[in-house]
Image: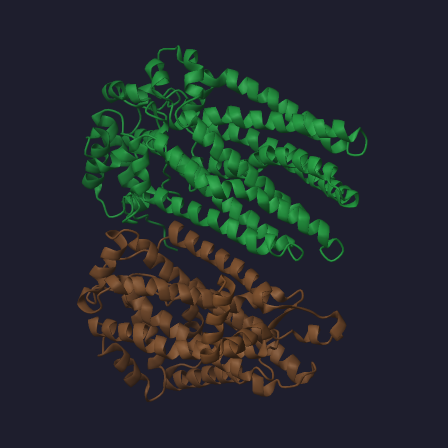
Chain colours: A brown, B green
Amino acid sequence: MTERTITSSAYNWIDERLGLSELAAFARHKTVPVHSQSFWYYWGGISLFLFLVQCFTGVLLLVYYRPGAEAYESVRQITFVMHFGWLIRSAHAWAANLFIFAILVHMFSVFFMKAYRKPREFGWLSGMVLLGIASVFGFSGYLLPMDELSYFATKVGLQIPVAIPFVGPAIANMLRGGPEVSEFTVQRFFALHVVVLPALFLPLLAFHLWLVQRHGNASPPSEDAKPASERKSIPFMPNFLRKDLAMWLISLNILALLASVFPWALGRQADSLVPAPAGIHPEWYFMSPFEMLKLLGNVLPGEFGEIAGILLFTLGIALWILIPFYDIGKESGQRARAAHYFGLLAVFALLATTVIGYWTIR
Amino acid sequence: MNYPFWNIPYLGSGWVIGIIAIFHVMISQFAVGGGLYLPLAERKAMRMADKQMGAEWLKQLARHSKFFLILTAVFGTVSGVGIWFAIGLTNPEATSTLIHNFVFGWAMEWVFFMIELATVAVYYYTWDRIDPKLHLKVGWVYAGASIATLVIINGILTFMLTPGDTWLAVAGTGHEASKFWNAFFNPTYWPSLFLRACVCASLAGIWALITSSHIDGDKHPALKTSLVQWSVKWLVPSFVAIPFLMIWYLMMVPESQRALLSLGIDTIGAGTFSIITRIALVIIVTSATIVGVAYYLAYRNPVEFNLSHAMAVLLLALIATGSGEYAREMLRKPYVIGRWMYSNGVRVPYVARINQEGYLVHSEWVWNSSTSSYSRGEAIFRGECGSCHTLSGYRPLKTLLAGRDQANIGSFITMLHDYKPDSPYRRFMPPMVGTKQDVDDLTNYLNAQVNPPAPAKVLTAQK
């Protein structure tokens, strides 16, 4: 038998049992529209890549990180003693921030291209849950080094769940493992960060990717309006994948640049007896909700204000998540315009409250 | 010292050179690589069996040569003169040493610059106006002259890292120029020349991708494919040879300088000079990324290759070039001219004398040296620390010394002054030179910056 026939018979043997041909056909099925807005199609892939980077660097950190009372010391060793430990930690932390940023860009591009419309509602919903889990990933990971900044920022951050009426304080206590942020909190956040969240995230991510593969990328309404002869598209495999790989390389390069030139610092060990240093604030992706609640609290002081703030905030998020069930039309009617303005309002509110938040750090 | 101090707050004077130099290197190395690219591409087009395609190539090359002319002959020359201004102001002592040694070298360099400027203009303005064979010859003359400029400046640049024992033996005697060729063909000359040649070729390909990306892929798919793919091939020599050339280069660098590369392997602690390791990582990753991105975006997708893609590759090249030049500068620490002059302009054999007679006595342009300790300290700070540090900004002393009191700052400066063989700072910082009084003056000045005295209560009249 020639080499070729050996390979093909081996392929056939596996194919009969695992259905490789079907998989290959499924992979070939997806096409990507080519138009002036195609740039935004890369952001889902970039988010995925940054997630993979975090899995890889996270496993390496896991080898040396010790949760609990020794948390700070182990991170100190990773940063200042181990060979290239600082690089792995910096890459993990920077990738986390870039990951959230990439997801946000991805989400808004999906929103404004109206890619949540039929049949992609589940893509939108699963994406929103993935963003939610990603932010909890960020929040739980931030505490793990247990330095001054992460300790006090977590303390401040846990004020958000506390504001939920009735059950808020109980949830916060459960997360903290007591009334104060302590080594028990680190232990809980660690379990959340490396076991619970990945267990939730991975299957959902697989579902999300399966949906993307099934339905392909959506064209923006302006493209859909064109006659079929004027629309261009390229197969995902291998044409768009090659471009995706180039974008992944560029993302990796930006990550390497940030991690090397601005390595992630480690502050002093957290000490609950020391007063909080000046300028403690939540991470940038929590700045907006934090500031919104603060502003609402100023407008409507007291407990009523807190509850009203939370309700208003929840309503806003619910409207955002449920947008595929409101903006259903194919044509750009009144509902489509309303959804578009809602999106612009969300971008404006997010940016404005983030800027105000940083502006008013004390 | 012999010249006034050029104080650039926040940014630091070194970065003034750095910013101009990175910009200049991106263009000047294109001038060399692109100088070879143009006649080689022109020759290829003239020999093509498909005459129609050859003519299209030549039309595109004429457009590329306009871009080349404007970029290299305008921005390249202006930024080159800018470097002269910047190094003369930032490090006049080192510039003086270079001029005294290499005035003949620079004279040759400028002759070739003149040839370059003349031929590049002739080359661009005579497309379709003179015999094509003669036009190609003009291109070859330009290529020869531009390669000659690299061959010369490389000797001067590498001299600063590795002046070589022969030159060092006559340094300070007034007969330095007698060892011109030894200083010129110094230990790192050849590896550096080949390294830069590879980078020049890569930049020729990368800049050509910018102009090639403008070709309409729908109307001229064959032209765009052939030009984009041919330009990407200019990255191949770098991809193959640079890892080996880099090893050769580092082998020729003194062990003490090579050791700087390993300082950041296990730490990012402040004041540990871990930056070279980190920047070296950026160089390696970015170089690999450029090749990968050029392959996927340009070589495999030439027809769809657009300006944004080309700009992405160019920006990556800027990161790699900037990091490379920065690392090369840092690799010289604590010297600006290896083993002869410290990075703050103090000549190595003068240290003992200055320690005895005082730093300000030898600083010709400081006329108020007899005033307060604070003022003397400020002058010493500008002269001895200012070439690498700012107060608050780049390598900020206020941050680096934060948390220390006066006694602690004093003992730190004393440690830099004593410069004992086991001092960790010896690996990358010059000694603090001067008398005990100079140490105290600098301490007073820095302490006043790090721990400013509480503002005196001002009594104001109440209405």
* Residue that appears at 56% across and 56% down: B296
Residue furthest toward the right? B129
In the image: residue B187, left or right of residue B359: right
As drawn, B354 above or below A111 = above
* Residue that appears at 23% across and 39% down: B409
The image quadrant that residue A169 belongs to is bottom left
In the image: residue A67, left or right of residue A264: left
The image quadrant that residue B181 belongs to is top left
Q: Nearer the viewer, residue A140 or A166?
A: A140
Residue A362 percent location from the top left of the image: 36, 63
Residue B100 percent location from the top left of the image: 45, 16
Q: Nearer the viewer, residue A72 or B346?
A: A72
As drawn, B428 above or below A22 = above
Q: Nearer the viewer, residue A254 or A307?
A: A254
Residue furthest toward the front? A1
Residue B311 percent location from the top left of the image: 59, 51
Work out whether residue A352 can be spotted: no
* Residue that appears at 39% across and 54% down: A259
Residue B136 percent location from the top left of the image: 72, 30
Residue furthest toward the bottom? A166
* Residue that appears at 62% across and 74% down: A113
**Screen quadrant of the C terminus of chain B:** bottom left
Work out whether residue A287 can be spotted: yes
**Screen quadrant of the N terminus of chain B:** top left
